[in-house]
Amino acid sequence: MKNNGTGMNYVALRQAIQGKSIMFGGFDGDEDEDEIDNVPFWTSTDKPVYHVTNAKFNLPMFDDSRWDIRPRRWGAFNHPFLMIGMPDAGGDVILHVDTRFEGWYVMTATVKLDPWMCGPSDWAKDVVCWTPKCAGDNLNIAGERMFRALAMRMDCVEEGETKSTLYVDEDWEDNWNCSDSCLKVFREIRDGE
């Protein structure tokens, strides 16, 4: 049944990409959305990036005239352990930047586990990050800013730090099969001191 596989894609999206912990009855934080701090996850040169683990996505819906504007693909990667288990299952992650929200850039992630894991399925899609439109911004600059926050959250980078310790002395690049835009950010976070 296609719906079972699609449900697994949403579990993978919520855990591995959005950074939410699964618990009986749902995901950590779902029941207490009103108690989320609504603080930026990360700030780059006074340009805040909000992430769904720190803030509630409650931007006003864009008006009807903006429905024809398509979100732009910003990057993609293959996550080798999108669903942790025995064995781990990989899957594809596609990132889009949506410019339809007045004054904001919004990054969405579209996720699909490898078919051997869950059979036929539809892609899972949800918002992961958003940042205000600032002077000098464009889609690529804002996308990089949002993806940096997303990658730092995925790699468990400690608050106040900018580097991941998960991939020290590990040859991770071939396993992740990243687009150039994602690879650049991952390298800055994962490689070096």
Image (cartoon, grey):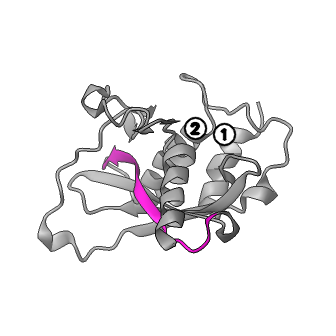
Residue 19 appears in the picture as rendered: yes
Q: Please tell me whether mark 1 sits on a helix, a strand or a loop.
A: helix
For marks 2 and 1 on the same chain, the one whose residue lies earlier in the sequence: 2
Could you say which is closer to the camera, residue 157 or residue 189? 157
**Residue that label 2 marks:** 152
Q: Is residue 128 magenta?
A: yes
Q: Estimate the x, y position of residue 67 in percent, counting from the top left.
A: 22, 72
Q: Residue at x 61, y 56 (%)?
A: 182
Range of residues picked out in magenta: 118-133
From the viewer's perspective, tell me whether residue 111 is left or right of residue 173. left
Q: Residue at x 68, y 33 (%)?
A: 164
| Mark seen at residue 148 | none
72 and 113: which is toward the camera: 113
Determine which quarter of the picture holds residue 64. bottom left
Horizontal and vertical percent for residue 62? 18, 60
Q: Is residue 74 left or right of residue 176?
A: left
Vertical position of residue 109 compared to residue 192: above or below: below
* The furthest residue to the bottom: 68
Q: Position of residue 127 (x, y in %)?
A: 38, 52
Looking at the image, do the residues carrying marks 2 and 1 touch, with CB atoms under 8 Å apart? yes
Q: Please, what is the three-letter code of the amino acid marked with disc 2? A: Met
Which residue in the structure is indicated by mark 1?
A: 189
Please tell me how crowded label 2 is: few (under 14), some (14-19), or many (20+) other residues with Cα within 10 Å.
many
Q: So how many labels did they put on this image?
A: 2
Q: Is residue 131 above or below residue 193?
A: below
Inspect the magenta stretch and tell me whether residue 89 lies in it. no
Residue 163 placement: quadrant: top right
Residue 96 figure quarter: bottom left
